[in-house]
Amino acid sequence: MDWIKQDDIGWIDVLRIVAIFAVVVSHSSDFYIAAFDNDRVSFYTGVFTESFVRPCVVLMVLISGYLLLPIRGQYSVGGYWRKRIGRVAWPLVFWSVVLPVVFYLYFHYFGQDTRNPGIDAATYTLGTLGTRISTFLLNFNYDTTPLWYLYMLIGLYLALPIVNGWLTQASRRDIETVLLCWLGTLFIPYLRILGPMVGAGGEVGFGPLWGECTWNVFHSLYYMAGFMGYMLLAYYLKQWPPQWSWRKTLGICIPMYLLGFLGTSLGYIFVDQLAPGEYQYLEIPWWMCGLNVFLQAMGVFLIFMRLRIRPRQWLSRAAAMMFGVYLCHFPLVHMAYDWLDTESLPPFVRLISGAVITFVLSYAIVRAMWRFKFTRRMVK
């Protein structure tokens, strides 16, 4: 998430807060989904709740694209990389160490009796702690799950100066042509599921496409797919926003969101029937770069673009805290689940209550870290 070029656009401040709270709700839902056949009420509660907030990360990418493109002023590629990636690198290193330590302390000393179906507290030893911390240069791990976004964001920052060079001379028609090709890649998740079903090869729920195999992951549309498409789309919407009335906006965006929500939720349930409990397949209907999540995100983003919210200092300050909330909330999600682990509350009440508790505590932690120069750098 980028905060440097924030122009205190009121609707963007509100959307940031909404998107980060949705991330917290999404992670709070995971434990209920993990019940699967052991508790179908919890499973369906988790599936439909997480599906409802699934476009949260896409909204974050759209915000970044809206603020960052086009890149203004004179810059060198190396200078741009140092500026942008440098702001992400320190939080990545800091939280790659802190989050595993927090998880270890909690599950080793306080949460040994957790009934969370997604956690095995016995695996939190000093040995595994060392492994989780020492391997962050290669990838994130379970304890640092939210940091996947930072790895992805670094990739976008590496490509932005190159893309910007094309944007500055591309016509509207050129951009629309590229976006149309990118929209075609949003069907890839469904083709991966359907391919093996019609005999095209591959495992159940996941089929290789267009030249993919064990020694080549770069299929025909590889370079046209991914999160960069959302960045370009945000730029396009900023340059040529839809001139719709409120009635037309709602008439298009609400059905768009609902159609995407049905595809996200029912798609997950469908794949669960194909490959029960196999997360590498279950996640396919939830891919951020799939058509159903795209429809949800666009329905929300276009509505927020129509809002006329006055910039306010307190709102901008709260929005600026959201990056830190995103970075620190993950252990608190697990703690809140244990605190509310009682059968006297329905799963949905526990889920939402846990998300609210996590969000509030995370915000308080970030506010405290904001007071000191060193810690502020890790959440700003």
Image: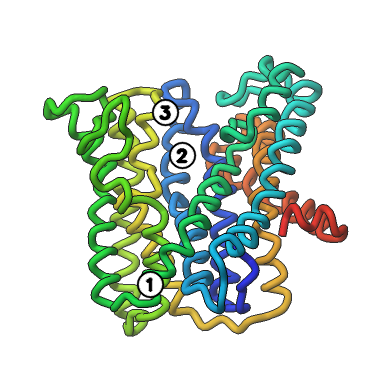
Q: Is residue 144 visible?
A: yes
Q: Residue at x 64, y 66 (%)?
A: 3
Q: Is residue 358 visible?
A: no
Q: Amino acid at mark 1?
A: Leu
Counting every numbered tag in the picture gives 3
Mark 1–mark 3 Cα distance, whole angstroms, equals 38 Å
Image quarter of residue 98 = top right
Q: Residue at x 64, y 58 (%)?
A: 82
Mark 2–mark 1 Cα distance, whole angstroms, equals 43 Å
Q: Name the residue beneath numbered marker 1.
A: 167
Which of the two marks, 3 or 2, is nearer to us in this view? 3
Closer to us: 71 or 130: 71
Q: Is residue 273 above or below residue 247?
A: above
Query: Is the N terminus in the top left, top right, bottom left or bottom right quadrant?
Result: bottom right
Percent coordinates x, y for residue 94 in the rendering: 74, 43
Percent coordinates x, y for residue 34 in the rendering: 49, 28
Q: Is residue 373 above or below residue 212?
A: below
Image quarter of residue 167 = bottom left
In the image: residue 16, left or right of residue 93: left
Percent coordinates x, y for residue 93 in the rendering: 70, 42
Closer to us: 170 or 244: 170
Q: Name the residue beneath numbered marker 2.
A: 45
Q: Is residue 272 above or below residue 323?
A: above
Percent coordinates x, y for residue 296 in the rendering: 37, 58
Q: Amino acid at mark 3?
A: Tyr
